[in-house]
Image (cartoon, rainbow, N blue to C red):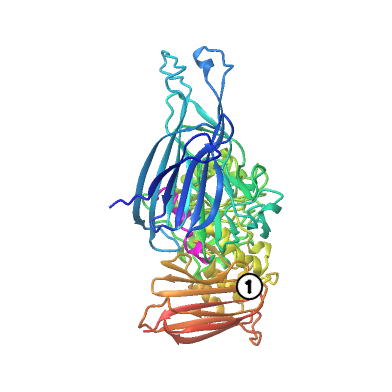
Amino acid sequence: MKRYFFTILLFIPAINMFAQAETVVQSPDGNYVFTFYQKSKSENTTQMYYRVSYRNKTVIEESELGLLIENRLFESALGIPNDNYEYWDDNLKLVDVEQNTVNQTWKPVYGERSIYPDYYNEIILKFQKGNSAAHHVSTDNGYDKRFFYFMNIVVRAYNEGVAFRYAFPEASNGLFLHITGEQTQFAFPENTLAYYEKWAQGPYSLLPIQDWTDECERPLTLKLTNGLTVAIGEAGLTDFVRMKFRLSDRKNNALQAVLYDSADVVTPFSVPWRWIAAAEKPMQLIENNYLTLNLNKPCEIENTGWIKPGKAIRISQLNQGDALKYVDFAAKRRLQYVHLDAGWYGKEFLMESDAAKVDSAKDLNIPELVKYAGQKGIGVVLYVNQRALSRQLDEILPLYKKWGIKGIKFGFVQVGNQHWTTWLHNAVKKCAEYELLVDIHDEYRPTGFSRTYPNLLTQEGIRGNEEFPDATHNTVLPFTRFLAGAGDYTICYFDPRIKTTHAHQLALAVVYYSPLQFLYWYDTPDHYNGEPEIELFDNVPTVWDDTRVIDGAIGEYIIMARRSGDDWFVGAITNNDAREISIPLDFLDKGKKYIATIYTDDDTISTQTKVAVTGKVVSTEDALKFQLKASGGAAIQLRTKK
């Protein structure tokens, strides 16, 4: 049965000269309330606004809605002097409101859960601009030149958050839309703090929003003075321009949605979603991060049996003899992939480098390597810079399929503008036609496209371990970057430059979600000297049937529990400070006993990594206590006792 949470309230504000109507939509549980209204901006114009609350607490104060659109009419095609311009401005007339409720679930090809809820109340606000009866020009070619346009604002209220986007029905006059920007604002209460990050691989700074000096990446996590933690972001970006945030110059304590560049679109067309999520405890944002996936189309790949998540090791020594050693190591350590990194086909930044053949200076035979790896159950992934991808994509995809390659890591991709955004997502679609997995590196941030094309296993867009960040940075990431989707953090282990303990590194394989999880970054098989604790890397999956956030605080610590089949894995990391934590095991099945294999830092251990491996029998009534070292962590594997 459909349930509608939709009201129109009519009242006369003392300061306005006309009646103002509010349209309200609530989440199914009633916690989120999205309110839309219009009011006078000046004597002759009106403006669209919205507010959002969560559990009767303010999330978004009065904020503007709208797009900046500049259109030149096509008079020249009709033999009419083209000295007329039409600008999308204010004064949109609300002509209708459509209401819908959807209550369903869906099963991903893989994910952090085996099933996701998709339950929301929706309103579609339908607007018209101009006079449909005026300025009509009848022509022989059927062109309907009337000075009127239609735009919808689609609003969804989920239990996990709210989202809205601008949508344009098919126009009868044939005009394209030249979108130059957004009016969209996110106004917050005074003294709001935000985890500011200028670029996708940058560090975070907790700053008052009024102190910003530049644009900020999305998703953005904020701390409000009313106790709420809020996140705002983007979903469904495939053929438009990237959005970021900057401090508004029109309203105090407000952030402005900023587009990378202008965009040209032909109707029907929908702009990507802008989403808002709130939580009384920050860890709830992580548990609800599938909101981004829900705002994308269902899987469009008919046969997904070839899409195999797994763990990988990078082959940095680009010669056949060493490459075979990496394959042997991968097979021994129960990895699924080896990855030939940059340089295998020549200098990646030179246009003349040919990604259809091995660099003549390299002792590599890829078909033979693929054959050897395949005999051991290991797939091969190739790195290709976008310079080569943009020139050779249609050439190399059938070739790599012939070689038996399992996936491509896209390197140094262009992100931001409409052309390269569209190109990139079309490239992922083309890879699916040849049954090739994709990992996108550098500045690309996910907006949920892996639901539609799950051959896109993971992406970077993260300040990962190749940058050697400290432990505090690592405890910020789950509450910020990972709200957008999987992150290829490139976990290190043996490299002496890491700024955390080794138990911390082990725990990251549980805490951080990446269906293609790179382990041993910067390491070689020769670094391994029989350390028993890396059995956790051997055993840990990269996708899950259930995910629980046990406890955590942004920039301080996090404890994650994830289930695969009957087994549970727990990862706990702290920031640069030592910390005592307790992990209740009440997520385990009642009445069952589990064998817990525990990995902790221990300076008394003689190995170079100083990680102790201990075991005990536990049940749902137990709690495990740990004294974590500064920059330390702990990992646990829980298997049912036979």
Q: Check the image and name the residue furthest to the left.
A: 1
Does the image show residue 485?
A: no
Instruction: Give 455 or 362, whichever is nearer the viewer.
Output: 455
User: Of residues 617 and 591, which is closer to you in this image?
Assistant: 591
Residue 214, given in percent of the width and then of the height, sits at: 69, 48
Q: Position of residue 492 (x, y in %)?
A: 62, 68
Crowd class of label 1 (few under 14; some 14 to 19; many from 20; radius 10 Å): few
Quarter of the image holding residue 314?
bottom right
Which x, y percent locates residue 226?
A: 57, 61
At 44% from the left and 85% from the top, the residue drawn is: 618
Q: Quadrant of the C terminus?
A: bottom left
Q: Position of residue 565 (x, y in %)?
A: 39, 71
Q: Is residue 5 left or right of residue 178?
A: left
- The residue closer to the viewer here, 73 or 592, is 73
Is residue 292 covered in magenta? Answer: yes
Above or below for 568 versus 26: below
Residue drawn where x is 65% and y is 56% of the image? 196
Q: Is residue 70 magenta?
A: no
Task: Write the residue at 37% across / 58% down.
Answer: 107
Taking 97 as reference, is 175 left or right?
right
The amino acid type of the residue labelled 1 equals: Asp
| Secondary-structure class at tag 1 | helix
* Labels in figure, total: 1
Can you identify the residue that label 1 sits on?
Answer: 526
- Residues shaded magenta: 283-300
Give the residue furthest to the front. 14
Q: Is residue 490 left or right of residue 426?
A: right
Viewer can see residue 622: yes
